[in-house]
Image (cartoon, rainbow, N blue to C red):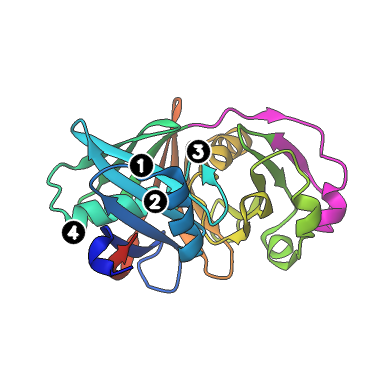
Amino acid sequence: MNQLNLQAIQMYQVDAFSNKVFQGNPAAICIMEGELPDAVMQSIAAENNLAETAFVWKRNGHYKIRWCTPTIEVDLCGHATLASAYVLFEKYGILEKTIRFDSRSGDLFVTKSEDGKLYLDFPVDQIKDVETPSGLIDALGTEVLNCIKGKTDYLVEIGSESLLRSISPDFHEISKLNSRGLIVTAPGDKVDFVSRCFFPQSGILEDPVTGSAHTTLTPYWATKLEKSVFLARQISSRGGDLTCELKGDRVLIGGNAVLFFEGKIFV
């Protein structure tokens, strides 16, 4: 079929939670005139083969956002929301300091600070202590100090940053968890806490930097450390830095973003 008969969609790839390309978490951002069929959005995400593709279009004076991994649509994605706001601020002349997104997880807000850092304003996760699932200790190969469950993920704490860096998890066992995935965390050597995030259930073995996981990590560490503002780092191979603040029933998650490419796709 001639491409002239297809719909052209502007797409960007942005590395979120980093100020350098090839670090942080890459997300594809499709800026659209309106909603596409679910199957088309999922096919675009599979073609991109990134942890997340965000689909954004203007509606009723604000923006609608949806997110797809290469295999499924998800309820919340932090890094792709941060990347979407970066594109809107930098490429579409948004003059307001805050962008509102309408999502499957409710209203989400991203504010641009004077120094250019972007702050996600997300609902805090509701967490509870649970028993460590059968097989999880063997899947991680290390002792688990605490285990909690949020709305979508398990979170476990282990002994140290060095230990967290060294684990080679059994993704087959993790995929059996009744959850979106698994967050593993430890006290940081130079920051308040570090984490790694595994989502084989969603087609992502290890996510480079997971904004949404910090809606779970922040209230967990707020209770442990008895404070509300944190420096955090996700210690994947790409790595990413975040600032987190617990504010009542919301979490502020701050980070930088950098553009990798822009162009058009045809569907």
Q: Is residue 243 visible?
A: no
- Determine the CA span between mark 2 and mark 1: 7 Å
* Badge 3 density bin: few <14, some 14–19, many ≥20, Cα 10 Å: some
The mark that comes first in sequence, 2 or 1, is 2
5 lies left or right of 180: left
The answer to whether 90 appears left or right of 247 in the picture is left
Disc 1 and disc 3: Cα gap in Å?
10 Å
Residue 139 lies in magenta, yes or no?
yes
Identify the disc placed on residue 65: 1
Q: Tag 1: residue type?
A: Ile
Classed neighbour count for the residue bearing mark 2: other residues with Cα under 10 Å, few (<14), some (14–19), many (≥20): many
The answer to whether the residues at label 2 and label 1 have Cβ atoms under 8 Å apart is yes
Q: Are marks 2 and 3 in contact (CB under 8 Å)?
A: no
Predominant SS along the magenta part? loop
**Residue hosting label 3:** 75
Could you tell me the amino acid type at mark 2? Ala
Q: Quadrant of the N terminus?
A: bottom left
Q: Is 193 one of the magenta-colored residues?
A: no
Q: Quadrant of the C terminus?
A: bottom left
Does residue 3 appear in the picture of this structure? yes
Q: CA distance from mark 2 to mark 4?
A: 16 Å
Residue linked to disc 4? 91
Identity, as a three-letter code, of the amino acid under mark 3: Asp
Q: Tell me the element at label 4.
A: helix
Residue 64 figure quarter: top left
Q: Which residues are magenta?
A: 124-148
Give SS at disc 1.
strand
